[in-house]
Amino acid sequence: MGNYEDRLKNLLLNQAVSRIDNSSNNIIHRMLQEYPNFIYMNQSDKVIRFKNENRISDLLSEGVKAVYVLYLYKGQLFYLLDTSSKERGEVGELFIPTSFSNFKKVLTENQTNIFIQPTIEDLGFTLIKPIIQENKIIAFLVLDYQESSLATLSSLLNVSVKTISYAIGFSLFLLFLFICYIIYTNYVRYTIYHNPETNTLNRVYLRDNYDKINFKDYYVALVDLDFFKRVNNIYGQENGDRVIISIMKRMSTLLRTEDMFIQYGGEEFLLFIYKDTLDEEGLKKLLEEIRLLVKNTNFIIADNRFSVTISVGVLLATELEKSLQDAIHKADTALYESKHSGRNKVCYFDLTQSERLYREKLKEMIESEKLVCYYQPIKRLSDGKLHHYEALLRIEDGDNIIFPDKILPSLEDSYLYSFLTKRVIEYNVNILRMDSEMKISMNLSADDLINDAILSLLAQNADLSNRLYIEILENKSIDYQKVELSLQKLKLFGYKICIDDFGSGYSNLNHLLNLSIDYLKIDGSIITEILSDHRAYSLVQTFALFSQQNNIEVIAEFIDTQEVVDVLKEFGVKYGQGYYYSKALPYRELKKEVDDN
């Protein structure tokens, strides 16, 4: 009987944690995919550690007391990630389990272990899940459940085991068990998916139900609290969370039961507004009411009174989209417009029919094999030897070649821009892996450099960093502080950094001093005037002198004659590219040169 009772306990425990177990699989998979050296990157980078602690905090629910990640080193366990606010385990801090045998069981059986805590006060049971990378257990995800959770399950075992021997008693017990399981499963699902303070949904619900939401039945809106980091910085995270909860409650009062309110991020919300009972004019009125409600609400913390505003991006024509991801991205494009045009407003995604069709055509071509790169050599001016090639984006549409100036403006401020960047990186990575003698420089925008997905892709291919250079394309809204942090990470991976089109518009020497760069590429519009315009001559001379004094190599664009080469060599410019050497060609047409570096 004792063996049967133990098996019944294990069955109930496994049933109780199955939902969280599934969610944790998704979280672990995403973390390992983004951070191939998982242990080291979380130990050494506070930003990565903070991001991953936020991820595993999604597993916290009413029944879960603590969630943390431990790693094994020389037979002992140490903290890597911890979501606890009290008694928090810092990274590298020794963790002493009540019994190491439970962890040893996970190591030997290579599967999740769930066990009841017999000695620790306030704990009911614990789940230990192996984190596996390259077929090796590198860490453990641990969830401690509150004692009340165990009490709920234990109550099911109080039925006398002896009654199971009677057929009718056994049937009633199974029925009772099944009903309790259904009730408990629904309760667990509800607590995982809902914020108990606001009764709104969270991003775990969105992740688990992504393919089940019939998004075409809804208008999709993204709401972001303006400058909310200031509130957290001034009043603290705890007070900031209270303000967010208050705002969510107020917004919810204006929504209907058929609408969905999802906390998409810390201070970003995703609204699905049901279309059947609300036309577009009604939606616009509703969103304006929500905006004004938040704006006119006063908050008081430590005798200080303040208010908060929101920016909103909306997609109306969701029925035209192929996926929920496309719909959210277009709402995000509208949100970007709202934030960059003054904030505290509602903006709607709107393209003309011709723009919409052209963007859709570009999207299809980017996803197909029509996206390619042409390569223009960058050579050493002293002897014409090859240094590396610059990858230049092209789309081959039959006999028609589409150039970047016809592609990038149509994708600017849309999610397709970062998608295009990832495709270009993947294209060049394939070339480098196929050709071990090839060296390539590749253009990334300042926005690309602060995109986590793009940085992760570059990190995954860091073994190519000695043959893959990064050229930065600037824009008006560049955040130099964030870009510099990204550059420092890339340089740790071994990448060389170049400022592209220097002198063309946004760049200046003051900003240049704040960035860790290896190369400076002088804009071709200046180089073409160097023989005829004294100002252009002086500019190039100044840039070259500044670069020499700061150990930065200079590359000149648009070189078209030997005379230009001679002047540049006098200035100390080391490298150049242009039609004097070669136009850009597809990889298949390159006459391969071996670089002499």
Image: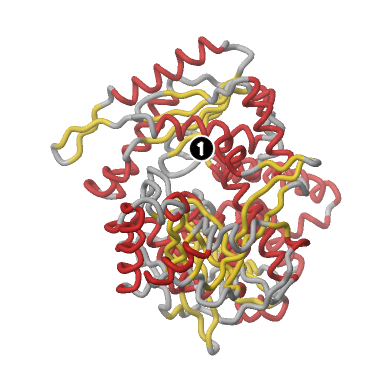
Q: Position of residue 147 (x, y in %)?
A: 50, 58
Residue drawn at point x = 46 percent, y = 32 percent: 335
Q: Quadrant of residue 125?
A: bottom right
Rendering quarter of residue 298? top left
Describe the element under mark 1 as helix, strand or loop.
Answer: loop
Query: In the rendered structure, which amino acid carries the disc numbered 1?
Result: Asp
The residue singled out by tag 1 in the image is: 413
Q: Residue at x 32, y 53 (%)?
A: 534
Residue 563 place in picture, x, y as percent: 48, 63
- Left or right of 50 on screen, residue 465: right
Q: Relative to residue 179, is residue 44 depicted above or below?
A: below
Q: Position of residue 82 (x, y in %)?
A: 44, 65
The N terminus, quarter of image: bottom right
Q: Is residue 515 left or right of residue 574?
A: left
Residue 33, horizontal then vertical, whole percent: 63, 62
Task: Report the residue at 32% width, 57% height from top.
Answer: 539
Residue 440 in the image: above or below residue 245: below
Of all residues shown, which one is farthest toward the right?
167
Q: Residue furthest left?
A: 303
Q: Do we see residue 131 in this rendering?
A: yes
Residues 34 and 9: in front is: 34
